[in-house]
Image (cartoon, helix red, strand yellow):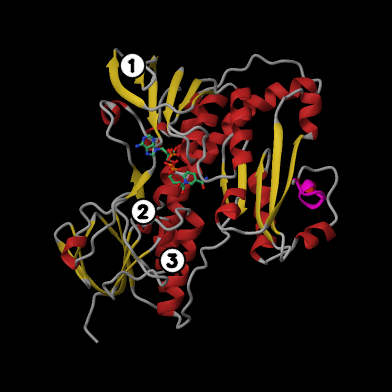
């Protein structure tokens, strides 16, 4: 065997890269990880974690409103945006430190700088070349924006939105995917006049149709202004503000425009051409079920592969890679029935097939559905419905999908996902006695199919 500097070089110290590196090192491999920022990656530094802290902060405004129905006196409370951002940053410093320590304790060498592949076994960082038997690409993704005049110059992305020094009074968010609706909840909850502009007729393409409709009602009810079926024509600066012309001719002047129009794999300037790897049109690297590229010594995991772009998936792929190669325990990640959540206000949790998926796949199915005002909303007076749905295979009785919009949906669906992953039938759900009074019990008490 050739004499390499390392058994494994990982490019990117995000969730997937760190997991792969420290598990491989734990199995006895000599590992280096290359990172140009602090360890942590998108999820810890620019995504899930800071976003969720801001969602927690934003949710208090509705709680304060709701408390009045329970006898609390109305309070005239102002929110200090800067204080929230400072405390969020302190928490991120703590987490980045933990990631650095995790790598050091596992014996992984952290190489700071930008890594560029120069051959099947070599990576260059700041003019120095390092060699390894295997290279793992875990560089993640980055926000992308469509070619709209003025958008790239004047719009922020989620990266900047998490670090604004002041809360904008009016904000226009472009797009209606995960990131757009989560930030709509943050800005609206923290008091900004929030507009969501999107080209589809309903937000959240790919989610179950009844949740999408329910989200429209809830978001509007909470004060977000929705602009469906609209694109942005141009964005111009107007003093400190932005002048946005929409496809319907309407002109809006706002303090901030945020583009949440998808993400692209970060494969530019990675040296992929040196080994003949050509990214696809989204910049993503194609891999097989073992996360291996067509260059046998080069692997890729996480968002850079654009398979299922979720942190726990990247972590699972990194762990499987490390076990496969350094613990003599080859295994692949099962990408079916992965639960996910949208931390909108109210949030969404989902696992498995939607009703549309079942129709498209020609599955003989039944729908069990409930739409109700959660108990807390009776006395609070909040006019907001929780929506729950089960998609069931009519022939086998197996529950194919579970979907929820409403308070605690992500926490509830995580538990339901175990049942769906285990292949539970509707009869198993029916045989489960509910916890009363909860919203979650509705998942085991829906008796009558919709059609
Ligand atoms: P999404 O792919 O979810 O949404 C992109 C949005 O941008 C859609 O509304 C899409 O419209 C719109 N869009 C795309 N191209 C254009 C265009 N040319 N003109 C106008 N609108 C456009 O991307 P996000 O950026 O929201 O999130 C990226 C990924 O990050 C997610 O897919 C998810 O995997 C991950 N993520 C997960 C989170 C979680 O688990 N809670 C949170 C945040 C991100 P249309 O619907 O019409 O296609």
Can residue 444 be found in the magenta stretch? yes
Magenta region's main secondary structure?
Answer: loop
Residue shown at 40%/63% (left/top)? Answer: 104
Q: Earlier in the sequence, mark 2 or mark 3?
A: 2
* Residue 279 shows in the view: yes
User: Of discs 2 and 1, which sits in the foreground?
Assistant: 1
Q: Which residues are magenta?
A: 442-450
Judging from the image, what secondary structure is the residue with disc 1 in? strand
For the N terminus, the quadrant is: bottom left
User: Which residue is outermost to the left?
Assistant: 127
* Residue 27 shows in the view: no
Residue bearing the label numbered 1: 243
- Above or below residue 281? Residue 343 is above
**Tag 2 near tag 1, CB within 8 Å:** no
Can residue 321 be found in the magenta stretch? no
Residue shown at 45%/38% (left/top)? Answer: 89
Q: Nearer the viewer, residue 76 or 405?
A: 405
- Above or below residue 64? Residue 199 is below
Residue bearing the label numbered 3: 318
Residue bearing the label numbered 2: 140
| Mark 2: few/some/many CA within 10 Å (<14, 14-19, 20+) | many
Q: Distance of mark 2 from mark 3, alpha carbons?
A: 13 Å
Q: Is residue 373 left or right of residue 94?
A: right
Q: Earlier in the sequence, mark 2 or mark 1?
A: 2
| Mark 1: few/some/many CA within 10 Å (<14, 14-19, 20+) | many
Q: Quick check: which quadrant has ligand 1?
A: top left
């Amino acid at each position: 065997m050739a004499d390499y500097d390392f058994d494994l070089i990982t490019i990117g110290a995000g969730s997937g890269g760190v997991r792969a590196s420290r598990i491989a090192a734990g199995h006895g491999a000599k590992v280096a990880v290359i990172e140009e920022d602090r360890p942590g990656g998108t999820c810890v530094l620019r995504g899930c974690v800071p976003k969720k802290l801001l969602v927690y902060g934003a949710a208090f405004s509705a709680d304060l409103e709701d408390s009045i129905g329970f006898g609390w006196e109305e309070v005239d409370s102002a929110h200090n945006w800067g204080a929230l951002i400072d405390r969020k940053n302190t928490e991120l410093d703590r987490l980045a430190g933990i990631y650095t320590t995790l790598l050091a304790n596992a014996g992984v060498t952290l190489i700071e700088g930008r890594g560029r592949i120069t051959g099947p076994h070599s990576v260059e960082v700041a003019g120095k070349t390092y060699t390894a038997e295997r290279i793992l690409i875990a560089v993640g993704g980055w926000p992308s924006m469509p070619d709209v005049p003025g958008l790239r110059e004047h719009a922020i992305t989620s990266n900047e939105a998490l670090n604004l020094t002041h809360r904008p009074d009016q904000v226009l968010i472009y797009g209606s995917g995960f990131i757009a609706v989560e930030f709509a909840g943050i800005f609206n909850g923290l008091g900004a006049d929030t507009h969501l502009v999107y080209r589809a007729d309903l937000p959240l393409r790919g989610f179950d149709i009844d949740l999408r409709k329910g989200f429209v009602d809830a978001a509007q009810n909470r004060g977000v202004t929705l602009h469906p079926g609209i694109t942005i024509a141009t964005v111009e600066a107007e003093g400190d503000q932005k002048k946005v012309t929409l496809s319907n001719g309407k002109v809006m002047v706002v303090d901030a425009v945020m583009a949440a129009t998808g993400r692209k794999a970060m494969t530019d300037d990675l040296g992929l051409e040196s080994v003949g790897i050509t990214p696809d049109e989204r910049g993503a690297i194609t891999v097989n079920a073992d996360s291996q590229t067509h260059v046998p010594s080069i692997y890729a995991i996480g968002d850079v592969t654009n398979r299922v772009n979720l942190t726990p998936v990247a972590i699972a792929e990194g762990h499987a890679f490390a076990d496969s190669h350094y613990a003599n325990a080859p295994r692949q990640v099962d990408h079916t029935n992965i639960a996910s959540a949208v931390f909108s206000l109210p949030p969404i949790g989902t696992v498995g097939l939607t009703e549309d998926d079942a129709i498209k796949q020609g599955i003989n199915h039944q729908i069990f559905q409930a739409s109700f005002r959660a108990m807390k909303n009776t006395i609070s007076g909040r006019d907001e419905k929780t929506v729950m749905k089960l998609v069931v295979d009519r022939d086998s009785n197996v529950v194919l999908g579970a979907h929820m919009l409403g308070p605690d949906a992500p926490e509830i669906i995580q538990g339901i996902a175990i049942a769906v992953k285990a292949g539970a039938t509707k009869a198993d759900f029916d045989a489960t006695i509910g916890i009363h009074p909860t919203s979650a019990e509705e998942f085991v008490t829906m008796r009558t199919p919709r059609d």
